Amino acid sequence: MILGAFLVGYLLWSRPVGIELLLWLSLLSLFIHQVEEYRFPGYFPGMINSWLFSSQRPERYPLNSQTSLVVNVGVGWCSYFLAALFGTDCLWLAIATILVSVGNIFAHTFVFNRKGKTHYNPGLLTSLVLFLPIAVLFFTTIIREERASLVDWIVGIVLGFVLNYIGIVKLIDWMKNEDSPYVFPVRCMPPDRK
């Protein structure tokens, strides 16, 4: 939340426009998305482990707090920040990170709700209210203004797949440990639905 506040201050001071603004807002939306997932209501980790993986140890397996740190900060924050920082100079990176947001939209809207037999999961609201309009505006703008080269599209789509699959799905698999000491607090477990 503190990083988000600093980012809002930076945006008010620097006043970026166009694609640059969308990419900084994309980073801000990632911060807010993670607050929804891990804090308010915050039961995303337990939900993933329980609903998606049917874990008997949802506080630590297969997603644990160390993996979550690597995925969210190492992959998420770094790639979104670099995309915003370099803007249109590395449009392929921007395309890739926006595709991570699109992956979140799909997962939170369809996959997690279907597996959990619910209409809401932590991350759904920010996926629909923030990620979706930013993604639509971003792709509409670069297509309408013909900003992306064929190389930008190819590299961006391939990297987007890598970030979604390797940077999230495979990292969870590679770092899983049933006896992990990196547990989530009780507040990160889904409410009892029995």
Image: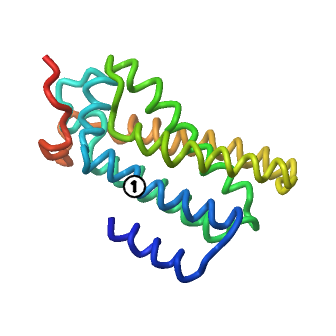
Q: Residue at x 21, y 33 (%)?
A: 178
Relative to residue 36, is residue 113 depicted above or below?
above
Q: Residue at x 28, y 48 (%)?
A: 38
How far across and down, in percent of the image, does residue 119 sit?
A: 36, 24
User: Can you say which quadrant of the picture contains the N terminus?
Assistant: bottom left
Q: Circle 1 sits on which residue? A: 32
Q: Residue at x 41, y 58 (%)?
A: 31
Q: Residue at x 41, y 40 (%)?
A: 125
**Badge 1 element:** helix
Looking at the picture, tell me which residue is in the foreground, 95 or 1: 1
Quadrant in the picture for residue 84: bottom right
Looking at the picture, tell me which residue is in the foreground, 43 or 48: 43
Looking at the picture, tell me which residue is in the foreground, 47 or 172: 47
How far across and down, in percent of the image, does residue 166 sit?
A: 53, 41
How far across and down, in percent of the image, does residue 72 sit?
A: 41, 53
Counting other residues with Cα less than 10 Å from the Cα at mark 1, is it few (<14), some (14-19), or many (20 or more)? many
Q: How many marks?
A: 1
Q: Is residue 171 left or right of residue 64?
A: right
Relative to residue 174, is residue 20 depicted above or below?
below
How far across and down, in percent of the image, does residue 194 sit?
A: 13, 16
Q: Is residue 158 left or right of residue 14?
A: right
Looking at the picture, tell me which residue is in the foreground, 48 or 64: 48
Relative to residue 188, is residue 79 depicted above or below?
below
What scheme was used to colour the molecule?
rainbow
User: Callout 1, which amino acid?
Assistant: Ile
